[in-house]
Image (tube, rainbow, N blue to C red):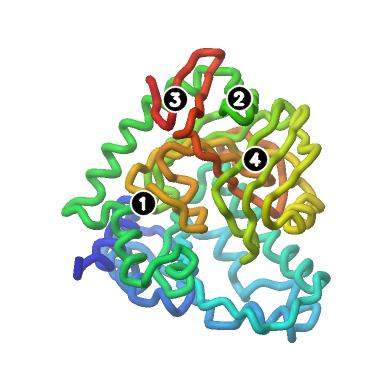
Amino acid sequence: MENWIDRYGALLADYSLYLKEGDLVYVRSTTLAEPLVRSFYRHALQRGARVEVELAFDGEEEDLIRLGSESALGALRYGSIDLMNECTAYLLIRAPFEAKNDLPAADPSRISLRQKAHAAFSEIYFRRLGDGSLKRSLCQYPTLESAERAGMSLEEYAGFICHACFLDREDPASHWKALSARQQVYVDHLDRCSQIRYEHPDWSISFGVKGRKWINSDGKSNMPSGEVFTSPIEDSVNGEICFDFPTLMQGRDVQGIHLKVQDGWITDWSARVGKDVLDEVFAIEGTRRFGEAAIGTNTNIDHATRNILFDEKIGGTVHMAIGQSYYQCGGKNQSSIHWDLIANMKNGGRIYADDRLIYENGEFLI
């Protein structure tokens, strides 16, 4: 595995973003991911692309929220909006620094200013994904912070990423192409359906998808991937659902989420841990409707790591996201939040499409 970083950079440039002559790539990460950024940079240049890199340093955002003026809080890095408007490909490499638990609590009004600034960036991002003018990939570089959250050593976590992305195989792209072909069968069937029901011994939730598009997420938008997803018709969601996988929101732990929904509106919520986080999130505009419904298929990921990039792809799970819809699916809900919440289906879960059983105990039947 000594060449895994170079294999990673090549996979992102050649398969995930399928770069070509004249592409403008906007890369964002932190200084911790420099080895992967450099590998990707070299492979992108070899394909004739131009690359613009933005690297955050340790403590940058925390210092800005604590010390910045209102004008500074309300602005993004100079040129980032222009780049998001003009780039043809966007790569976000997650590489978090160690969390700072000794910092004083930030003023909520200052955090709100930052959220509004990021919302302008997100609006352009989601609009361009929706109209097909932007190629994107989101991936992870192993750092101590993400390894510790996952309960692994740094070496173990690097191995976990490699396995999830097929980087431990001689030709990773060939395995992603095989997964893509398998998922296309599911997407072709789901695109012909009008009503979906996720059913579990402890809960049941249904939603309409007529006219909405299902997406085959096969490693070209996220790396790793392994899911099929859509945006449900906003006012069609009814029932209740329990999300039994642990999750994080702004670094805060939330577990055992239970939601009740009527005509697309989340009417009631509870959590075994982090109910106060739910209260805060559901006060944000657009978060009481669902922006996504999805089915995870990546069997190389078999346990939760408190990292949604991996956890939402776990084979044998479903997830639903509150907040922002995917425009490319036909979704219409708008929010500054898109929060994926995951439920295990290996323990009696079923999926019905137009009242036909198509999935049981974590496995498709079609």
Task: Choose the circle earlier in sequence order: 2 or 4.
Answer: 2
Mark 3 or mark 2: which is in front? 3
Q: Are the two marked residues, 1 and 2, in contact with CB atoms closer than 8 angstroms? A: no
Amino acid marked by disc 4: Gly
Q: Residue at x 78, y 57 (%)?
A: 280
Asked which secondary structure carries label 1, the reply is helix
Residue at the (63%, 48%) spot, across then down: 256
Give the mark, 3 or 4, whose residue is nearer the N terminus: 4
Q: Position of residue 33 (x, y in %)?
A: 40, 74
Position in image of residue 117 (x %, y %): 72, 66
Which of label 1 and label 4 is nearer to you?
A: 4
- The residue drawn where x is 57% and y is 26% is 199
The kind of residue tagged 3 is Glu
Which of the numbered marks, if any, corresponds to residue 16?
1
The label shown at residue 291 is 4
Farthest residue toward the bottom?
A: 67
Q: Residue furthest top?
A: 355
Circle 3 SS class:
strand
Kindly tell me whether residue 299 is visible in this rendering: yes
For this rendering, which residue is in front, 303 or 235? Answer: 303
The one nearer the camera, 121 or 247, is 247
Nearer the observer, 35 or 248: 248
Position of residue 93 in the picture relative to residue 343 (left or right): left
Task: Pick whichever of labels 1 and 3 is earlier in the sequence.
Answer: 1
User: Which of pointers 1 and 3 indicates the residue nearer the eye?
Assistant: 3
Q: Badge 2: how crowded within 10 Å, few (<14), some, or many (20+)? A: many
Residue 15, above or below 266: below
- Residue 360's label in the rendered image is 3
- Could you say where residue 293 lies in the image, as x and y percent from the top left? 57, 36
Query: Upstream in the sequence, badge 3 or badge 2?
Result: 2
